[in-house]
Each structure stands twice: as structure tokens, then as C-alpha cells.
Amino acid sequence: MDFFEVLRRRHSVRAYLAKKVEKEKLERILEAIDSAPSAGNLKAYKVVVIEDERKRKELADAAFSQQFVAQAPVVLVFFADTQKSASHYGIRGEQLYALQDATIACCFAMLACFALGLANCWVGAFDDSKVKEICGIREQALRPVAILPIGYADE
């Protein structure tokens, strides 16, 4: 699909079919994330892939009962690695660059999904501590930035 067509047609989807996302498509999305630009090419972010139904339901609850999160067969959770960025860029890296790195990575994932025929919806409303717990994140320096449910549109 033409890049500008992707930009024009991409939209948020909050209803998903009960159809698995193919491994090859998920791998291409992860490759797109890895190709995203980042400050100093540090890639000061972490992405957690959630496919387990129970954990997807927990994430939906942590996202203030946005149940469509649980409906998607794959959920990506993006974390800013504030310590990694701060080690090179100080306070600006901690407070800004790490956040930018994670958001750019999520945007690349969104566009890759649509180009592959998949739908998604950026979710930014959630309980940070619950999301970290569900994802098994203990590092203080990892800050949740976005939840991205991915699947085939059912709307």
C-alpha cells in the first residue's frame, strides 16, 4: 500500500475479530518498531507483547475498562526507558527524549499494522502501576506510554 494512502486511511478501531494475527505480520511490526528513529539511536524504550487472554483482560481493566483492549488478539505495551536516555542526555533525556522514542516507536507500529491489513487503537488512558505489574515490569525507570491493541477490524 502506498505510504500516503496508509496515512490517509488509517484510523482507530475499537472492535476486533476473533482471528489470530499471523506470526509473520507480528514480526514485521516489531521490525518496523526497531527501525523507528530515536535520540542518539539509543532506542530508549521497551515493548512488551501480550497475547495471553487473561493478561489482555487485565490490561483492559487497567485501561479504565476499555474492553476492546482485551478483544484484540495482540496487545503491545510501550515503555519509555528514562534511565537509558538520561545516561546520555541527562534530565532532558529522562523527561523528554525517552518519551519521544517510545511514542515514535508506537507510531511506526500503528502505520505498519495498517499497511499489513491490521487495525489498532492508541490507548493512553491507564493506571501506570497496574500496567507495569501486568507486564512484569519492576524497573522504576520504565514508564508506560501507550497500549496498542492489534487485530483484524470488526467494524
Image (spheres, grey):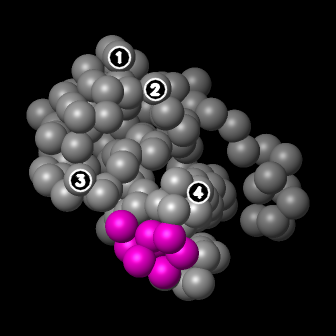
Residue at numbered disc 1: 64
Q: Earlier in the sequence, mark 1 or mark 3?
A: 1
Q: In which quarter of the view is residue 82 placed?
A: bottom left
Q: In which quarter of the view is residue 133 placed?
A: top left
How many numbered discs sit on the rendered protein? 4
In terms of secondary structure, what is the magenta stretch mainly?
Answer: helix
Q: Earlier in the sequence, mark 4 or mark 2?
A: 4
Q: Amino acid at mark 4?
A: Leu
Q: Amino acid at mark 2?
A: Ala
Q: Earlier in the sequence, mark 4 or mark 3?
A: 4
> Which of the pair 4/16 is nearer the observer?
4
Q: Amino acid at mark 1?
A: Phe
Residue at numbered disc 3: 140
**Image-based side of 21 in relation to 155, left or right:** left
Q: CA distance from mark 1 to mark 3?
A: 22 Å
Quadrant housing the C terminus: top right
For image coordinates 56% across by 84% down, the residue present is 41
For image coordinates 46% across by 26% down, the residue present is 125
Residue 136 visible from this viewpoint: yes
> Which of the pair 70/79 is nearer the observer?
79
In front: label 1 or label 3: 3
Helix, strand or loop at disc 3? loop
Q: Earlier in the sequence, mark 2 or mark 1?
A: 1
Helix, strand or loop at disc 4? helix
> Which of the pair 88/50 is nearer the observer?
88
Residue at numbered disc 4: 96
**Bounds of the magenta segment:** 83-90
In front: label 4 or label 2: 4
Q: CA distance from mark 3 to mark 2?
A: 20 Å
Q: Earlier in the sequence, mark 3 or mark 2?
A: 2
Asked if labels 1 and 2 touch by Cβ distance under 8 angstroms, the answer is yes
Magenta-colored stretch includes residue 87: yes
